Amino acid sequence: MGAEEKLRALGLELPPAPKPVGVYKPIVIVDQLAYLSGHGPLQSDKTLITGRLGDDMDVQQGYDAARQTGLGLLATLRSHLGSLDRVVRLVKLLGLVRCTDEFEQQPAVINGCSELLRDVFGEDNGVAARSALGTNALPGKIAVEIEAIFEIR
């Protein structure tokens, strides 16, 4: 089952592909690698999920924000590639979590994106090398920012 069919089977709807809010490209393709710029948790109504983990957000809310960010990554891929079926595999994921100094569950938050990509691309092709880091600030007070590298055909 291809990624597009899997997306439909999971009943997932992608938000509009986010537009750049600065001097950068949302995706740059070099050879067979697609580098996706940092994406935030943009919702279909064009609002962002904001908050700080360990303060006004709990792990589940952070997980949900990371999952929404993953949907945005998929929207950017589809918008630029024409189909998610062109994705061979996820290579690397970097997740930043806006959190308090005491918050230590960044990996559990970024799992929201990682599990989504695993479900869409499969265990072998949807699970990659990953980093999940805490930070004190992100643009617009968004809860998470995630960037990714995909191998494409």
Image (cartoon, rainbow, N blue to C red):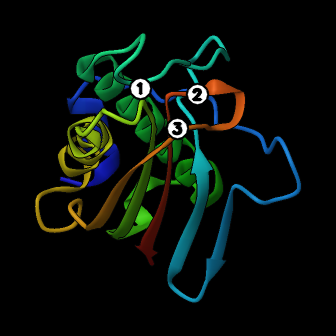
| Total marks in image | 3
Q: Residue at x 71, y 27 (%)?
A: 140
Q: Residue at x 54, y 71 (%)?
A: 34
Residue farthest along the bottom direction in this orientation: 31
Amino acid type assigned to the residue bearing label 2 in the image: Ile
> Residue 142: which numbered mark, if any?
2
Query: Quadrant location of the C terminus?
Result: bottom left
Tell me where residue 91 appears, x and y as whole percent.
Answer: 34, 73
Which numbered marker is on residue 115? none
Say which amino acid is labelled 1: Ala
On the rendered structure, is 26 left or right of 60?
Answer: right
Image side of residue 153 versus residue 49, left or right: left
Category of crowding for the residue at label 3, using alpha-carbon neighbours closer than 10 angstroms: few (below 14), some (14–19), many (at least 20): many
Q: Nearer the viewer, residue 74 or 95?
A: 95
Is 59 rendered above or below residue 109? above
Which quadrant of the figure has residue 56? top left
Helix, strand or loop for disc 2: loop
Disc number lying in front (2 or 1): 2
Left or right of residue 110, residue 77 in this image: right
Q: Position of residue 72 (x, y in %)?
A: 52, 38
Q: Residue furthest front?
A: 102
Q: Residue 92, position in %: x, y?
A: 37, 69
User: Hey, what amino acid is under mark 3?
Assistant: Gly
The residue indicated by pointer 3 is 72
Q: Residue at x 54, y 49 (%)?
A: 78
- Of the numbered discs in the image, which one, if any, rests on residue 65? 1
- Check disc 3 and report its element: helix, strand or loop: helix
